[in-house]
Amino acid sequence: MTHARQQTIQVVAHRGASEEAPEHTLAAYRKAIEDGADALECDVRLTADGHLVCVHDRRVNRTSNGRGAVSTLELADLAALDFGSWKGREESAESPDWDPGREPGRSSEPGDFTSVLTLERLLELVADAGRPLQLAIETKHPTRWAGRVEGRLLEMLKRFGLDKPPGDPDVPPPVRIMSFSARSLHRVSLAAPAIPTVYLMQFVTPRLRDGRLPAGAGIAGPGMRIVRNHPGYIARLHRAGHRVHVWTVNEPEDVEMCVRLGVEAIITNRPKQVLAQLGRG
Ligand code: G3P
Ligand code: CA
């Protein structure tokens, strides 16, 4: 591995530093920022009353003490739930060198580990991070809402001034939108052409084999399983002119493989370890 190559890889914290803190909580994102992640990944879903919240699963059952689908619950219902204790505060605080209460310049807030996180709050955190930080936002089950997820998302990005390309061509856009749904990305690309889009792939289906992506998708987002099983496909994506962002890359040998293949971004639950492996820790 050469350091020149390693420096070019963007390290993206998947659901925050989600190995150490409960996924999609402020604590997980604060930790990722402190660890030096280049970008933050989050999933967004619409609540029954139209708020975008950062929750991965369709239901809240796994990551909270509640039950039910996010789409049937209102923000106030989600705000009453505990989204952190399933992981265990002790487990979250196991990292010997980190406690949000000891973060330089700030103390933790009571809800950091347990509150549902709205996209709005995450955008505020990024705006206050004090350094350039990118966001990779994934639309979950967008088809159910026939464009409402993308509509609300783009509205909010506009409100934060994140829907325009940066003035300096050397500065990467602050936000990109990812999805397994080509239709979702197509909608985004029509409504907000300046926002990069990432097409997430679990399998290399016949229509993806030649390295071309569906209309509206700019960046390729293969899962690590594709990279392991079809390493030649990464070169094909590159030849077709696509940057490649791989998820979810946690094991050192997978990081090594991504480096060797020259991918542009690694999405990981362990930003600190990956940065250390890349010589940036
Ligand atoms: O970053 C892409 C990755 O998050 C897609 O899979 O299931 O973790 O949302 P999932
Ligand atoms: Ca995701």
Image (tube, grey):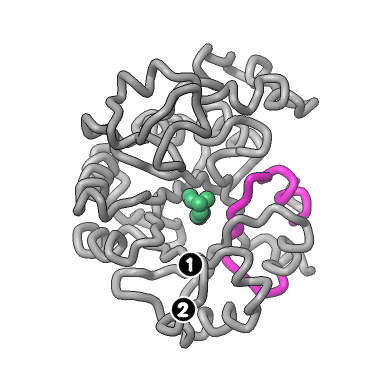
Q: Are marks 1 and 2 in contact (CB under 8 Å)?
A: yes
Of residue 119 and residue 79, the one placed in the foreground of this image is 79
Give the percent coordinates (x, y) of residue 117: 42, 29
Question: For the residue carrying disc 2, how many other residues have a C-alpha within 10 Å: few (<14), some (14-19), or many (20+)?
Answer: few
> Magenta segment: does it hold 270?
yes
Q: 67 above or below 264?
A: above
Give the percent coordinates (x, y) of residue 93: 71, 23
Quadrant into which the N terminus falls: bottom right
The single residue placed furthest to the front in the displayed view is: 67
Q: Residue at x 57, y 81 (%)?
A: 233
Q: Residue at x 26, y 46 (%)?
A: 149
As helix, strand or loop, the secondary structure at mark 2 comes to loop
Is 126 on the left-hand or right-hand side of 52?
Answer: right
Q: Is residue 214 visible?
A: yes
Residue range in magenta is: 260-278
Q: 231 above or below 6?
A: below
As helix, strand or loop, the secondary structure at mark 1 comes to strand
Q: Is residue 130 visible?
A: no
Q: Residue at x 49, y 46 (%)?
A: 41
Query: Label 2, on which residue?
Result: 205
Query: Label 1, on which residue?
Result: 201
Amino acid type, label 2: Thr
Give the percent coordinates (x, y) of residue 204: 51, 76
* Badge nearest the viewer, 1 or 2: 2
Give the percent coordinates (x, y) of residue 193: 26, 63
